[in-house]
Amino acid sequence: MAGIYWTEGCARVRNFSAAVRSTGNSIVKVEIEVLDDFELGHLLAELKKLARPAIRKGRRSAPKLLEDLRGKE
């Protein structure tokens, strides 16, 4: 499980919602109001760390070269 944290009084949840896609995956959206610039930077850095594994999963493998498809001679 992963989480994001902020200093009390520096940010607050403004709104949230959820939706279910036809694929069966659920999407949760959270709107956070940030009152401090340093807290904003911290939150963005934490979200970037959490997003990296999801981004890597979605990447396609590099296209194969013609030589790779023919086999090495």
Image: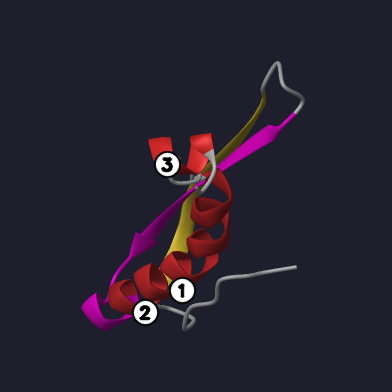
Q: Which residue is mark 1?
A: 46
The type of residue carrying mark 1 is Glu
Question: As shown in the figure, which amino acid type bears the numbered disc 2?
Answer: His
Q: CA distance from mark 1 to mark 2?
A: 6 Å
Local secondary structure at mark 1? helix
Disc 3 on helix, strand or loop?
helix
Q: In x, y percent, where is residue 50?
A: 54, 66
Which circle marks residue 67 in the picture? 3
Lateral position of residue 49 relative to residue 39, left or right: right
Mark in front: 2 vs 3: 3
Magenta segment range? 25-39
Up-down relation of residue 51 to residue 8 (above or below): above
In the rendering, at what x and y percent does residue 60 appear? 49, 42
Q: Name the N-terminal-most of marks 3 and 1.
A: 1
Crowd band around label 3 with a 10 angstrom C-alpha radius: few (<14), some (14–19), many (20+): few
Q: Which image quadrant: the N terminus?
A: bottom right
On screen, residue 2 above or below 58? below
The residue tagged 2 is 42
